[in-house]
Amino acid sequence: MESLAQLELLCEKLYNSRDSAERAHAESILKCFSENSDYISQCQYILDNASTPYALMLASSSLLNQVNDRSLSLQLRLDIRNVPFQKSIMKSVIQLFLLFYCICMAWNYVINYLATRGPKLQTFVIKSLIQLVCRITKFGWFDDDKFRDIVKEAADFLSLASQDHYFIGLKILYHLVGEMNQNCTMCLLALINRTCTYIHKTSDETQKANAMPLTLHRKIACSFKDQFLLQIFQISLTSLHQLKSEVPDDFRRDPLSLALRCLSYDFVGCPVDESSEEFGTVQLPASWRPLLQDPSTVQIFFDYYKVNDTCVSKEALECLVRLASVRRSIFVEDPSRTQFLSHLMSGTKEILQTGQGLADHGNYHEFCRLLGRFKVNFQLSELLSIEFYGEWIGLVAEFTTKSLLSWQASFANDSSDDTLDNVDVLQEQLESLPYLCRFQYQNSSIYIINIMEPLLQAYMERSRLPAPGDANELSVIEGQLTWLVHIIAAILKIRQTIGCSQESQELIDAELAARVLQLINVTDTGVHAQRYQVLSKQRLDRAILIFVQNFRRSYVGDQAMHSSKQLYARLSELLGLNDHLVLLNVIVGKIATNLKCYAECEDVIDHTLSLFLELASGYMTGKLLLKLESTKFIIANHSRETFPFLEEYRCARSRTTFYYILGCLIFMEDTPVKFRSFMEPLLQVAVNLEATADAAFRTDVVKYAFIGLMRDLRGIAMATNSRRTYGLLFDWLYPSRMPLLLKAISLYADEPEVTTPLLKFMCEFVLNKAQRLTFDSSSPNGILLFREVSKLIVAYGSRILLLPNGTDIYGSKYKGIWISLAVLSRALCGNYVNFGVFELYGDRALADALDISLKMSLSVPLSDILAFKKLSKAFYGYIEVLFSNHITFVLNLDTNTFVHIVSTLESGLKGLDTGISTQCASAIDSLAAFYFNNITAADGPPSPAALNLARHIGEFPTLFPQILKTLFEIIIFEDAGNQWSLSRPILSLIMISEQMFSNLRAQILASQPVDQQQRLSQCFDKLMTDVATNLEPKNRDKFTQNLTTFRHDFRVKNIQA
């Protein structure tokens, strides 16, 4: 870089140029500032001497990236304290301490820089510098007490005479709270890039980890909350009072945003989903109680709501929503809670009376949320105790009525979205309707019928016409009928007897249901049968399906038949439907019609199959379906000629559901003859595919035929829930059809479109649910099945590993890999194969399957494993099975591979998914238990596998201590939902070496305040009380009980201290 002027010019091009090539060129030159730590001093030079805001932005953002990239190094520096120093790592340790010194100096420099030059800087530069300070503060929180002075430094900004300094101080506190409250979603994104940090690698192999471990994040967040959050919230309140009338509206937003961020803090480690309409309880600490009891705390936010700026008023309401959501137990006495409630109600009453600010959509939305908190967080008796409750509830009722009458406003923002197209939103909107209608059910039903009758009559008349006529007018009628059907469906969803007897309610239900059932008979007749491509017709049929679902749950079935005589008597008079069997035939007829006519509408097909599945899944309704002619027709004619949607690729996934339903119905009758007859169309497809030459096998016709066959077979396999029904499918498939599967996966290994349905079928086929894979003692079927699985996995894995990585690596590779791992995991733990047979008779099926599956697993970087949830679950499930059932295979691996696999388990423990954490804990427990039983407590000479394990641990002696440390951090500092599972590996690791446990104990105690160490030492003593030196189940249970007590005492007493 020849001069600062050239750098400033490049920075301007980087941030301002509209030429992408010019921006890319500037970025390629300037990226060294954010990637190379040698440029930290040059960034400081730029900040001191640059004149353009873009150069300042480059320097601050580069420093921020430098801190991010080396966050792991700071954590590693702390961990190195307990690792024996080796010459090979001495240089790295010295570099880490030098880097830490540089970061400390950078922290001081930026604070001083903001104090001296901050008021003259652009807003985006100030923000970047503040983010840098806050990030350094978080990463160094436990490294040096100097970093905790940031709150004092920010307060010093507030005490300066300059108004600009005052708002810089508020911004520092605002971003500091946000940095410390980095939520679990951000942690998950960070965990994506986490790699194994414990394996000693060469510099070329070392990978950066840009994430802070979740356990450390929680420790820092809790420490910050306990020491400074209340003080910062008090500063925000003080600022709100001071700035109430002294500054323009724009400046008032800063202290308000700070207060909102404090109230939105993750107090208990379970952050609220801000995208949700619901808001959970705010778990404020008891130390905040005096502030809540002070009337001015609530009043200041109501005062700020009156500000004309809608951004300010909206944030004020958001603060009030959180205050109204505080936990009830924070108020020790009822009078204080009543006083707090009275202030909230008084403020909302004034808003209801004046209507100020409610014309703004954001204010209106937040005010509705605020009113909703009264119902959630306070009891009716408490509301009634407020003197002006009668006036308040009257205003709320009036506000609600006006809101309902102004329903058009909810559609004003986006007229392109129709509520009828979003069933979930529609159901939510209609949720309260049944309760309102049934208070005056007779009058409400008459009103609905009077509206529907003329529309139904007009729709019937249109069906008789030779031509559709005005299509727009017909669409309007269908839209009106759709709304009415949804309303009736919502009413019938809830059966209650408020205001009328059960008999009269049934009669009214029958009157409403009769109109919809009459509509069913019309929708597929005349000109309406030509309108399946029209959106309004599709909406109407979806509404009818929802009605049928709700009506069936209340009135279809043997019990419903006997308890609903009045309803069926009335339906018999109106429509001739004298019992539920006749009604079911109408419903299944509608299902068959939809499946035949809606070939290109995936949404209607999915809704139809959902209803069909619901009917077939019930034991009584399933038996009833088999008696119906319409059901027999579907079972006997399940070809693509009858149901064209089976040919539509967009409905390919629906095929699996369709055949799952048919499979459930077929297996209810339990006759091999009917099963073979049912499978005849699929057999013809399979035979044709088998006869196809390899050269023609990759044509589209063959490909889509095979994909459809796999989806169909998967649905049928899902329906086999007993040994006998599974045997029918197994005998149909093995051995004659298995070569087709091997041929397909060999020829289509590079086509995920083909391999995915094939592998998913096998994943279902090898699953031993309900012990369906139980063969006779003399049957070799279990072994034969695994051999076929091995052939498929080896054929797929050996080919997929050779393929280059594409742009969509998940779709092209990872998806097939995780399904393959799931297939093998299910086969390995299905308990229908004696795997010792393979080695005994020299069969390579097991060895080849394990070998290729491990190669596939190791081909995926750990960062990618953690990034994709399904891949993570399959990978860790596979590793758990290996450690539980085939640990000898793992121990026979080379040391680097073994340590890498074990380290991935530690990364899984630190993740946010409880299921994955449990799998990792189980795998670690199996490994530690093997070490204890075969090495620590072994009586005889060690086995070759035990010798291998001892060799692995000898080369990496800190592997077990690091895992034990991670487990204790999770137990102590996180709210793990699988504490029982985590306790298992902890005991096994403690049993391996008392010295390892003693060292960790000393390390944890040393990190605690001196005045608490003796008490916490007693907690550790109690942890091993009555725990013997063995891994028997009774001893494990005792340790788990002690660990629960230990965690409670350690955390609760520490908080009190």
Image: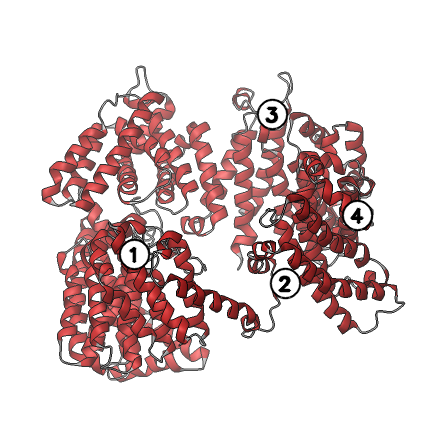
Q: Name the secondary structure under disc 4.
A: helix
Whichever of labels 3 and 2 marks the residue nearer the N terminus, that label is: 2
Q: Are marks 3 and 4 in contact (CB under 8 Å)?
A: no
> Residue under circle 3?
783
Q: What percent of the width, then of the height, locates residue 52?
A: 27, 83
Say which element carries label 2: helix
Work out how far the residue at label 1 is from the one at label 3, CA to CA, in angstroms: 71 Å
Work out whether residue 286 can be spotted.
yes
CA neighbours of label 1 inside 10 A, class few (<14), some (14 to 19), many (20+): some
Give the number of the disc on residue 338: 1
- Please report the residue visible at 51 percent of the width from the left and 39 percent of the height from the top: 853
Q: Nearer the viewer, mark 3 or mark 4?
A: 4
Q: Which of marks 2 and 1 is nearer the N terminus?
A: 1
Q: Residue 136: x, y in percent?
A: 23, 62
Q: Where is residue 322 in the image (x, y as percent from the top left)?
A: 34, 60
Q: Give the image location of residue 75, x and y in percent.
A: 24, 51
Q: Give the Cα distance between marks 3 and 4.
A: 45 Å
Q: Mark 4 points at which residue?
A: 589
Q: Which amino acid does label 3 sit on?
A: Ile
Rendering quarter of residue 790: top right
